[in-house]
Image (cartoon, rainbow, N blue to C red):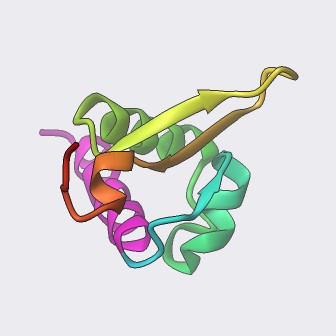
Amino acid sequence: MTAQSRRVLEIAALIEGYLRSHPHAADGVDGVLWWVPEIALEPRALVQEALDSLVERTVAIEKRRDDGTVIYQLRPAETDGGARG
């Protein structure tokens, strides 16, 4: 695993922690950079990779607005404590 890959995983873990602590948070990449001070100086591309990995792992979802803006948030099943039905 490369240093960049490790950093993407670290960033993803920080974002996931924030989302789990703030389950109704939703924002684009720039907002996510603002949420988590530890990643504020990271390259935007690495944060995007981290968000993509959270979506791929079904931790987060992405929603595309009419203007093309992509918003990320905790997967809805995660926000209700896993209750179904």
Residue 27 as seen in the image, left or right of residue 36: right
Find residue 58 and report its image quarter: top left
Please provide percent x and percent y for residue 78.
28, 55
Q: Residue furthest front?
A: 85
Q: Does the stretch in magenta take in 7? A: yes
Q: Does the stretch in magenta take in 51? A: no
Q: Residue furthest right?
A: 67
Residue 79 as seen in the image, left or right of residue 68: left
- Residue drawn at x 33%, y 71% is 17
Q: Residue furthest left?
A: 1
**Magenta span:** 1-20
Please provide percent x and percent y for residue 45.
56, 37
Please provide percent x and percent y for residue 39.
52, 67
Q: Is residue 16 above or below residue 70?
A: below
Q: Is residue 57 above or below residue 74?
A: above
- Residue drawn at x 41%, y 33% is 52
- Residue drawn at x 47%, y 74% is 22
Q: Is residue 30 above or below residue 4?
A: below
Which quarter of the image is occupied by the N terminus? top left
Residue 67 as seen in the image, left or right of residue 39: right
The chief SS type of the magenta part is: helix
Q: Which of 4 and 60 lies nearest the eye of the viewer? A: 60
Q: How many marks?
A: 0
Please provide percent x and percent y for residue 85.
22, 43
Find residue 26 and report its image quarter: bottom right
Q: Which of 32 and 1 lies nearest the eye of the viewer? A: 32
- Residue drawn at x 61%, y 72% is 35
Residue 2 as seen in the image, left or right of residue 69: left
